Image: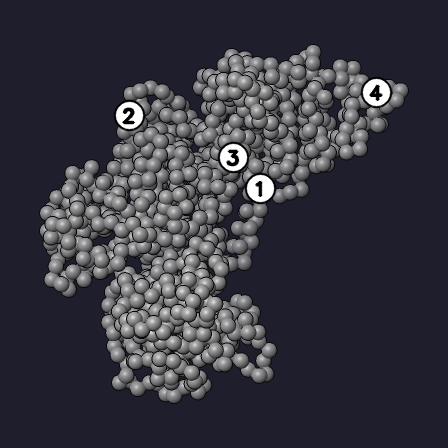
Amino acid sequence: MTDVELPTYTAKDFASDQDVRWCPGCGDYAVLTAMKKMAANLGVKREDFVFVSGIGCAGRFPYYMDTYGAHTVHGRAPAFATGVKIANPELQIFLVSGDGDLLSIGGNHTMHALRRNIDINIILLNNRIYGLTKGQYSPTSEVGKVTKSTPFGSLDEPINPITLALASGGTFVARSLDVDVKGLTLIIDRGAKHKGVTFIEVYQDCNVFNHQTWFYATQKDSRAENTINLEHGKPLVFGEENDKGIRRNGDSVEIVTLGDEFTEADLLVHDETNLSQAFLLSQLYYPEFPEPIGVFYVDDSRPSYNDQLFEQVDSVVESNGEADLQKLVTGSNTWTVE
Amino acid sequence: MTATELPPEKPTNHSDDSKVKVLPSVSVRFCGDSGDGMQLTGSHFTDEVALAGNDFATAPDFPAEIRAPRGTTFGVSGYQVQFSSSEIHTPGDLVNALVAMNPAGFKTNLEYVEPGGIVIVNEDEFTKSNLKKCGYEVGYNPLEDEVINSQYKICRVPMSRLTRESLVREDEDISVKDIDRCRNMFALGIISWLYSREIDSTIEKLQHYFGEVKKKPEIAALNERAIKAGYYFGETAEFFPSQYEVAPAKLKAGEYRRISGNEAIVLGLTTAATKVHKSLVYASYPITPASDVLHGLARLKQFGIRTFQAEDEIAAVMIAIGASFAGQIGVTGTSGPGLALKSEAIGLAVMMELPLIVLNIQRAGPATGMPTKTEQADLLQTMFGRPGECPVIVVAPSSPGNCFHMAIEAVRLSVRAMCPVILMSEGGLANAAEPWRIPDISKIPDIEVNHPVATDDDEEFLPYLRDEETGGRPWAIPGTPGLEHRVGGLEKQDGTGVVSYDHDNHALMTKYRAQKITKLQDVIPDQEVEGESDTLVLGWGGTRGSILTAVSLLKDRGIHVATAQLHYINPFPKNLGEVLKRYKKVIIPELNSGQLRMLLRSKFLVDAIGIQNLQGRAFFAEELATEIELAMKGGGE
């Protein structure tokens, strides 16, 4: 990206001419709004954006952005996005997909995109249900979930997307809420500027098949008590009255009430660069704990896969010299027939 | 015969010429344990025959096991080479000479030796325990079997002992292990002498490899001594009935190199990338027998090649499609089992109407099957093995060298029609090698690609507006201002490319996707036929060598057939139907149960006769000739 002056965009410039076909009230609308706002202000030309998705309700996302886009096959969007990035590293790539797509059928590809630190932005719209196939439980559904495919309750333990992303080597791992367009826009913007893989889980409401699944974390009356905002360098305080905090207790953490016994100085201070602390925070679950929202972990020191790839190409070109195709095709072991 | 005395180290002058018998063609097979270096030995010998000006064809025969327990039959690795004073196309059916480094090799390879053929064995390895390891009865030694001795010329050479005796120097501290590793070079020396091939070039290569590359000049010296010792042994031991010579072949003048099918694909893809002025992204998951293409391309970064070892077969093809979407040449390589995994994604590329090159280096299946053996049983999978009406371009090279040309063709056709192409090679081509006349790269034409740019702001860009001539859609790539558009797996409306569930539109788009492949008939060569007859022997892919050899055997018997080899399977050449109608009989040999025959019967209503081999190996020319003759007499089915 050079100094060429960018057109001034508004969010509207990123809206395609397609009617949005998500169910009214779907959490995806909020993400679309946040995305368009972010895109208008990112400082990237519209033609350099590529939106990639897999299958599911979230898979329709690229159709609604007036950028280059690819709606691929189920679970394989991370691989497609990887191909786009290594073919043209100048492109700004967003992968928007759901929990079934990215964690079930495409779990393998998500893990590998993370460990390679390929410079793409993965936005996981987690609604804990299969919406497009009309309501089966997903890999993030809670145990005992009663759905059409599990009339007596699901048996499998849900996967934790944040823990998975951290364990896979993600270098920007965050969580946000569909109801908080402002916060979401900021986090996506920060993630987009991160050099390396970005993984943002969004608590998203499916108001048809899994309505209110995140209400404990997203509603005005419950949010302050059940979530905790992560801010780098700040103590972990939460609660309607900002009267509670998270304190380290041996290998784990505990909730304490601020007052005579404990002050903010006793609390855990959020450190985005501390991987083991990020793991610990990723394991806080409602209702025992408030669930952290914000950036869990950032590692800006690891070079991205694509940067390394092109450095390797450059160094090979430097050491091997100009490519001589005829010489290559001829090889070193020839004979002549008169 | 037994040799017990080591010959004097200094050779006498060249053998008495009167003892040299001239043969038109010879085939030799080297076999031994996987760790005995048989592939390398065969490869060096092939270089020697190449330098002597012979035409040649090679075929490795190795186990899927990397290091099976030493001395077992399933750990045997073999390498066959035929060299000739005239043009040849196969490594030969039965060999004139076998070199067996151990009893397991002897046991599993004796069946490939012609009656009366020479069998040179490392006698020292025929110990009680080794014989037992490969399943011979206690007390039995096949070398002493009267029947075997009456059928073959068994030459018992104590190679282990002779190698040690000729390599050990009192003033040098060399491990027995290093010395024993040189036994293959001792064997190569014997064979080189037996067939009057020069060993100087091999010695140079050994010195270069061990001395300069591996920085182990002492190992280079050992190998040199071993090959010389073997050569002088042959010369002075008066051990063989005769020495043989095969005159140089009259090949077309030019500069030649040896090439295998997989090497040719690597060079072909690299050339295509240069000619289309793009980078090539090769994403692949390791699989036999396709991995060598990944290995080969991985070294060529300076040619704009970006290789990617993906996490699985599906990721590999998706990365390639992503790369094509972004404007480079996306290629993925695999074998039949991997192609099955990629099928949904190939359908995506068909719907997105993007170029994509898929290599299917077939092996014997189904499932894991016989990974190191050859077969042509993926034809129907390649043609139809995808959900929905999902046609792709299919091409099939017919020889190792031809893989170069067909790889370039694959890229050319794919970018022209904006459609995936599957190039079907075979294990039998991938690892086989032949002399290849080196092409002049500057004479290979450029591959033209036009990416659209926005012209008029008011004009709506139509990503699915077809080119009348090619039927393809515009390849607008991300980064191009004003052409932002979305593609995907959902059905597209003609022209605009927006999602459409309209029935008539689906029928139309289905038709368009097939039509643009048919349109390629205008830019592929018509089917050529060689020979005059009312019988046509029609093959596809790697059977060409066996068919040509069988046809020439028939000619010697006064039987004439015409032959043709299909390189383009979807679309078929424009004149194919007309060609087929010219013959009373059409005979189709395939390494499957009749897949091309099924296609041709359904498309052209031709009552073709099939000849099948389902053993996971190439046709033997002799058996094929016999079957063709039978079919001509009204036999066959």
The residue singled out by tag 1 in the image is: A116
Q: Amino acid at mark 4?
A: Leu
Q: Reply above or below: A96 against B248.
A: above
Mark 2 residue element: helix
Drawn side of residue B544 relative to residue A118, left or right: left
Nearest to the observer: residue B625 or residue B326: B625
Mark 1 residue element: helix
Q: Amino acid at mark 2?
A: Leu
- Tell me the quarter of the picture where residue B45 sits: bottom left
Q: Reply above or below: A332 against B584.
A: below
Q: Amino acid at mark 1?
A: Arg
Q: Chain of mark 1?
A: A
Q: Reply above or below: B463 against A2.
A: above
Neighbourhood count class around disc 1 (C-alpha, 10 Å): few under 14, some 14–19, many 20 upward: some
Decide: marks 4, 3 in contact (CB < 8 A)?
no
Neighbourhood count class around disc 2 (C-alpha, 10 Å): few under 14, some 14–19, many 20 upward: few
The residue singled out by tag 3 in the image is: A78
Label 3 and label 2: CA atoms lie apart by 32 Å
Nearest to the observer: residue B361 or residue B258: B361
Label 4 and label 3: CA atoms lie apart by 44 Å
Label 1 and label 3: CA atoms lie apart by 11 Å
